[in-house]
Amino acid sequence: MPPPDLLTVSGVDASYDRIQVLFGASLRVTAGETVAVCGPNGVGKSTLLRVLSGLLRPDAGTVTFDGADITRTPAVRRVRLGVTTVVGQSAFGSLSVVENLRIHGYAQRSADVRLGVEAALAVFPRLAQRADQPAATLSGGERQMLVLAKALIQRPRLLLIDELSLGLAPIVVGGLMQMVRRLNATGLTVVVVEQSVNVATMLADRLYFLEKGAVAAEHTAAELRARPDLAAALTLGGHA
């Protein structure tokens, strides 16, 4: 029996003021899976992630998490349910790596926070080497590691990542991808918004492609690796 769907998005419309961005977007993510949402700039990828995280309420459609309708559930409540979002490389620059991690355990007991910090540093040994350094002194790749580590403090069941590879050198992206794979191997379900199809096919099990705010195609990573012509067409915003 296949694993159940942990996340289901059905017919979602979303807009900013009167400008509609998403048009009937639908997708599903099974428990323990890594799914990528791809497409050119401006097709609604980050808007979809905002809907999933609870930062933007859709105009129509439903979002279901672990069998419960969370369409109108606030973002703070979604974090408590196990939905955590990673956006950019934001951190408190004047605080140390460990202090940044501790802040994200605000809703937990101090003993749990200590264990969470130790576990996060075990996953990211490079951060452990810089535990007492101010976050402002970290490289771009290290800041991205810190953001992922902070997410782990919240013990998510579903991790939403916006543009993992944006602005980073290929060797750094490779290291981050390895980290995300390790997290997924522990049972963590991952949805990543990613403009690079090459990165997405190496990271995800399945890929959804957005075009003009709607899901235009769905393929497995294996299908796209075998069809570079199709991957190139989808990258440019055209689907077969």
Image (cartoon, rainbow, N blue to C red):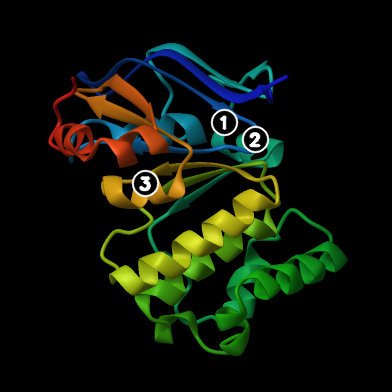
Q: Identify which amino acid the numbered label 2 is placed on.
A: Arg
Question: Label 1 to label 3, Cα distance in Å?
Answer: 29 Å
Q: Position of residue 186 (x, y in %)?
A: 70, 52
Place of residue 191 in the rendered image (x, y in percent of width and height, measured from the top left): 48, 40
Across and down, in percent, residue 54 comes to: 50, 32
Tell me if residue 160 can be seen.
yes
Query: What residue does disc 2 label?
Result: 77
* Amino acid under disc 3: Ala
* Front-lying residue, 156 or 70: 156
Q: Nearer the viewer, residue 225 or 100?
A: 225
Question: Which is more foreground, mark 1 or mark 3?
Answer: 3
Q: Are marks 2 and 1 in contact (CB under 8 Å)?
A: yes
- The type of residue carrying mark 1 is Pro
Asked if one can make out residue 54 in the rendered structure from this viewpoint, the answer is: no
Image quadrant holding the C terminus, namely top left
Mark 1 packing: few (<14 Cα in 10 Å), some, or many (20+)? some
Q: Earlier in the sequence, mark 1 or mark 3?
A: 1
Mark whose residue sits in front, 3 or 2? 3
* Rendered position, 45 above or below 176: above
Task: State the separation of the CA atoms marked 3 and 2.
Answer: 29 Å
Q: Secondary structure at mark 3?
A: helix
User: Any mark on residue 74, and which?
Assistant: 1
Q: Which residue is mark 3?
A: 200
